[in-house]
Amino acid sequence: MNRRKFLTILGSAGVVSALGSAKVAEASPASFPYYPDSWGVLHDTTRCIGCRRCEAACQKVNNLPEPKVPFTDLSVTEKKRHTTAYEWTVVNKYEVNGKPYFRKLQCFHCNDPACASACFARCFSKLPNGAVVYDGSQCVGCRYCMVACPFYVPGFQYDLAWDPLVQKCTFCEPRLKEGKLPGCVEACPVDAITFGRRSDLIKIARARMAENPGRYVDYLYGEYDAGGTAWMVLAPAAGGAPVPVDDPEGAGAEFKQLGLDTHLGSQPMGQLTYGALGAVPMIVAFWPVLFGGAWAMTKRREAMAKLEQEKIIKDAKDDLAAAVDAAVRKIGETEGEGAAERARQAMTETLKAREAQNSGDGHGEEK
Amino acid sequence: MDTHGIIIPTKDKLFNLEPLLSRTPGNIITWIILAVGFVITVIRFTVGIGSVTNLTEAQPWGLWIGFDLLCGVCLAAGGYFTTVACYVMGMKHFHSAVRPAVTTAFLGYAFVVVALLYDLGHPLRLPYMFFFPGTTSVLFEVGLCVATYLTVLFIEFSVAPMEWLAQKFPWLLTCRKIVIRVTILLTIFGVTLSTLHQSSLGSLYLIAPGKLHPLWYSPFMPMFFFVSSMAAGASMVIFEGLFAHKGVHQYMDATHLREADGVVLSFARAASFILFAYFMLKFIDMLVQANLPWLGTGWGAWWLVEMFGFVLLPALLYAKGARDGNVGLCRLTSVLAVAGIVLNRFNVSMIAFNWQLPSAERYFPSIWEICISIFVVTMIVTAYRFIVYNMPVLYEHPDFKGEEH
């Protein structure tokens, strides 16, 4: 049982697991390498001649629409094209240290793909044979996979009103099942793309570097980038001028010139989000306590304030009653009982009237 | 309150539609926008997303996500902000601000979902995320929280329509009692869900470090989004008040009018503190991530414009307005603060996104995308007007006056 399958089971346990425990499992580092026996492809850019036969083969074996520019026209490689929903692989020309080189673009079939991590309807899966495949039958068409992909690979059928889907290179998964090579690999006339076990390809790449000093940059793009990819790229060397050790900006210059992002890091892109997702159960657990506590404190403060106010009012009333009594007694002593009684009546009425007026004023505030 | 001539629902009449249907310039503009929006809607759903948008492989999320969703959700934060202030923190003098805030928050979220349907390739499959939950996805968390919070807001908001219709359907009184009894539960549930999805809107971009400019990309994006949503919530309450006092003044009762200025000043003070905290967070994050050299570039200048012109300036103006008791200044500042929030969301989702691509491949929304966004805003305003004209939102229904909740 692999990690994603494990998560699937957890996920299907429902909303609670989705909010809670599943995230903890995801936060663990990806096991690496992902599928040790998976297939991969090694793209040697020093060999590629930009003939676009891989593009033609891809179009043929995948029944893609005819291209706007025929495959025999090689001038389009000058333009920096991206893959689209209808062109799953394209070849572009790049200047590396002043010399022209070609690079084939397609899905890199990451070991732990960003698209699969980002998909909220579980349309993408990394198969044990190495291919990252997409099943559009439950695709919502949100295109977050396209935002997530660091290689700008998945394309969307923007032109379709009904059933528009995300499309990308499938590693010719159906052909792999039949024991055939991917269309592009089969069509390459110069062996610029080599198919094999990913683990073997890494050895082959190292061997090529060792056997051809000065021909390659001593780095295999995709071995670790973005957590490792099934399709890897060899870049031509700077031609004798080694990158100074103390020049971090110069590092990976050839790959940058080949249009490859050298800042992706060695962890799967999805892991960048796992920290934030891991905070979810904490917030779910802690926020109700925090705000419930704040509410309880507010309630208590209100109750205390009310009690205090009642006490103040009672004290004030007692004071007032005592003052009235004293005044009435004084009047009684000097003016006689009749006058004292009249004075008491007048004072009581005035107080009542004032009280009624005060309670009328304050109705808005008591809420 | 008798002096205001408020239409008391069901007592006077069930529907009060004249203000929506009369031939005023505002209404005519509304009808035109709604008609144009309807036409574009038909085109969008019969010809495809590509027919009305400039979206590409490199820019799969454009204005409909950047404005309708990111800004929409953020600017609807007034709901949780006001309910927490009133019910949890016990600031009862904000009580008259709760219903308008909950109403606008509910409408905001409801129309976020409506707008989202335009952007989805398979709008009808939106519920699929519950059947095939991709639990590794931030978007799943956003979807789950927004769906749940929309339900919470619907229940919180439902008191107003229930009071509206109570005389016709007396059984609604029972429902209303139940909802009012669980108000505090809904509030706490609401703030939890808001924290989660407001922050996860920022987490959405964590997965694309290579695409977003380093000045905006940060591991703390979830926190930035959450903190700024609080400022947005406070600012939007003031901002909406600015228009409500112009447009639907006669539907406010004496309590609402008496409390309105206090709400503005208190929220301005809160927003001032939050914006300043946000400014410090962003600035320290910039230093910690060693982004100082970027400030010398064009992107750095743009970042400084955002930070000083749209975060620090509104923070200071709010502080001055709140200190001087200057309601007008606070209201003006809310315009600036809201613009700042929108600018920030635009920067993250569109302007500083794909910053490394050559300008020919950069995205700019098509006129039709802008029209749909205007269409959605107009729908919200129209729905708000309908509610305010008919339901006790800006005034207390006399039958339920003075009830503690």
Image (cartoon, coloured by chain):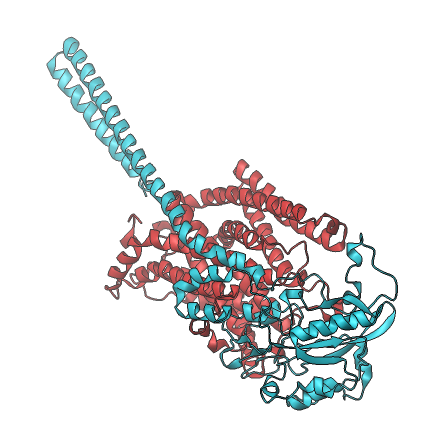
Chain colours: A cyan, B red
Q: Nearer the viewer, residue A287 or B146?
A: A287
Locate residue B139, reporting x and y percent: 52, 65
Question: Where does residue A173 sit, x and y in percent of width and height?
Answer: 60, 83
Left or right of A363 in this view: A128: right
What residue is rendered at 68% in x and 75% in y? Answer: A200
Which residue in the rendered view is the most extreme toward the top? A334
Q: Nearer the viewer, residue B153 or A313?
A: B153
Q: Nearer the viewer, residue B372 or A229?
A: A229
Quarter where residue A79 is shown: bottom right
**Where B275 sits versus A322, above or below?**
below
Q: Quadrant of residue A103?
A: bottom right
Expressed as whole percent of the image width and height from the top left, the position of residue B260 reads 44, 46
Q: Quadrant of residue A37?
A: bottom right
Rendering coords of residue A338 (x, y %): 11, 16
Position above or below: B244 against A147: above
A285 left or right of A235? left
